[in-house]
Amino acid sequence: MSTNSTGPDEKGFFEKVKETIEHLWDGTKDTAEDIKDKAADTIDTLKEKVSAEKKTVAKKATTAKKSVTAKANIASAKVKTAVADVKAKAADKAKTIKAKASDENAKAKKAVADVKAKAADKAKEIKAKATNDSTKAKTTSAAKKPAATKTVAKKKPVAAK
């Protein structure tokens, strides 16, 4: 029998690939959560600015109240559009990051499948070769046995005295 191992050449390869995929996925989730938190903080600060502007408007004289209210509404509308833009950008960024991670994950899975297939093919080749060598050895030894039996049978018996 052959002393060559039929296993893969590099031990731990699949574990390394799995750890890499998990690292990418965790990093992606953390980044998406950070973006979401930053967007929430931005929204809160914008809301505080709007509420501060509204308080200032309430303290002004009644004659100027209409113009100030209009300005507050404009500022509020600007804040709302800014908030909507921030939310949309954060959502797009999160989707992009998740899509990238999914793509890398799919590539890694494909690479693992390719390596497994190659390892299986190599194992089949080695097994077929070993079986073939074993069959040859058996036929060679089987061919030699009858000749040895014949020589033993041809010896002359010793005459009794």
Image: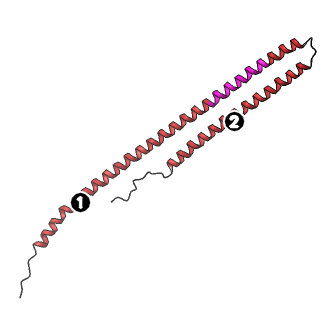
Which segment did they paint magenta? 76-94
Extreme residue toward the right, this view:
61
Disc 2 and disc 1 in contact, CB within 8 angstroms:
no
Q: Earlier in the sequence, mark 2 or mark 1?
A: 2
Residue 77 located within the stretch drawn in magenta: yes
What amino acid does circle 1 point to?
Answer: Lys
Residue position marked by numbered label 1 in the rendering: 138
Q: Secondary structure at mark 2?
A: helix
Q: Residue at x 29, y 54 (%)?
A: 131
Q: Residue at x 27, y 53 (%)?
A: 132
Residue position marked by numbered label 2 in the rendering: 34
The x, y position of residue 89, in whole percent, is 67, 26
Circle 1 residues within 10 Å: few <14, some 14–19, many ≥20: few
Distance of mark 2 from mark 1, alpha carbons?
68 Å
- The correct choice, above or below, for 99 with respect to 153 in the image is above
Q: Of residues 20 and 147, which is closer to you in this image?
A: 20
Circle 2 residues within 10 Å: few <14, some 14–19, many ≥20: some
Q: Residue at x 66, y 39 (%)?
A: 30
